[in-house]
Amino acid sequence: MSDHHDPHTGLHSEQGGLSGEHPGRAKNPVIKVHDLAWLEFEKPNLDQAEAFAHAFGFSTALRTPDALQLRGTDPGAPCVLIHQGRSRFVGPAFRAADSADVLRLAQATGATATKLPESVGGLSVELTDPTGLAVRVVSDTDDLAALRGQEPLELNFGHASPRANSTQRAPREPAQVQRLGHVVLQTTKYLESLNWYLQHLGLIVSDFLYYPGQRERGPVMSFIRCDRGATPTDHHTLAMTLGPTRYVHSAYQVADLDALAAGGEYLREHGYQHSWGIGRHIQGSQIFDYWRDPDRLMFEHYTDGDVFDCSIEPGWAPMSVSGLAQWGPKATADFTGANDPRVVLAAIKALTDRGNDMNFGVLRGLIKAMGS
């Protein structure tokens, strides 16, 4: 009998793909990116943005009158770049293996590789995905040295009690961000966008979700990771779902559950809006907690996420609100966007636009999934 364990059994996903379904990877991608490098935003009030960032657990790497760079404790480039402007998500930057991949991607797409500003260094090519989002691929950026971070607490599990003659007192302080984990995007051009990222960046799908009773229509959400061969990578670096085009949230790793929970209490005490949590996801398995910044953009603390190597094929599962977590409170209307009139109006408008994946069947599937 084989001792191979299939991670898509049990809660992770109900089953794998069926014959003829989306394979979850491109046969011959242009390059294979290694990770997210950073996310770029515009904000109207950099003082306000920096205050939230420090409460959330970032450190400031650079501050000028019209720019703010935020970092975690891990070495590397800053993980969030903020420019003065209206509040919006500008786009992601992915890290290539080397400059040769940046040049290869530029040549394949007809784009131009350019040097990045001295504040980050390195080489960049800027593309536009089918949704119209600016997507950078970068290499050879200047690495910031590691900062001293929070250490996971020593825990007594069951009858194992390594922590003797001492108490457990998690400090009420910001949960120090270690690194950027993933970004979640919603798009009316889901399938075209999915295939674009798989073909151009060599990403591969960890899990697909489909609307209950509509599997034959194909997937409507995908959790997508980097392909680094036998080296395990985060279950998802990018997640995409069908719906009105928007930034949904971005996620940042912290040391452990106590850091996440105590950091959440710190945010609450300082007047920031909680969106959903604490709980543990199914796809990706992360322990999560979601917060809104002063401009109502969503940011997630997470810890204990899955990592897969390239051998794991996509799992398939129906989309539902109850399927968003193994345990924790029910997903809130704030988290799903059901209480945001801008999201509802955008969904209605998308039904009248040509050239996208939105139709009344999709809307019925979405409503059913959000009610299940």
Image (spheres, rainbow, N blue to C red):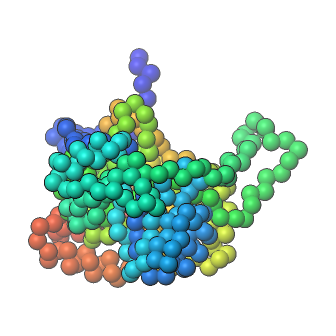
Residue 298 at what x, y percent from top left? 46, 69
Q: Quadrant of residue 238?
A: bottom left
Residue 367 placement (x, y as % from top left): 30, 69
**Residue 109 horizontal/vertical position (percent):** 17, 52
Q: Which one is nearer the viewer's eye here, 255 or 36? A: 36
Whether residue 327 is visible, yes or no, is no
Residue 74: x %, y % from top left? 56, 50
In the image shown, does 304 or 26 lie closer to the viewer? Answer: 26
Quarter-of-image position of residue 261? bottom right
**In what quadrant of the picture does the N terminus appear?**
top left
Up-down: is 96 above or below 121? above
Q: State whether residue 209 is above or below residue 262.
A: above
The quarter of the picture where the C terminus appears is bottom left
For the view shown, which residue lies furthest in the top direction? 1
Which of these two is toward me, 222 or 315? Answer: 222
Q: Is residue 219 above or below residue 84?
A: above
Q: Residue at x 59, y 75 (%)?
A: 51
Can you tell which quarter of the image residue 33 is in?
A: top left
Q: Is residue 269 left or right of residue 336?
A: right
Q: Residue at x 28, y 43 (%)?
A: 101
In the displayed structure image, the side of residue 337 where residue 143 appears, left or right: right
- Residue 179 visible in the current orientation: yes
Q: Residue at x 63, y 60 (%)?
A: 175
Q: Which residue is at 69% across, 48% downward?
A: 151
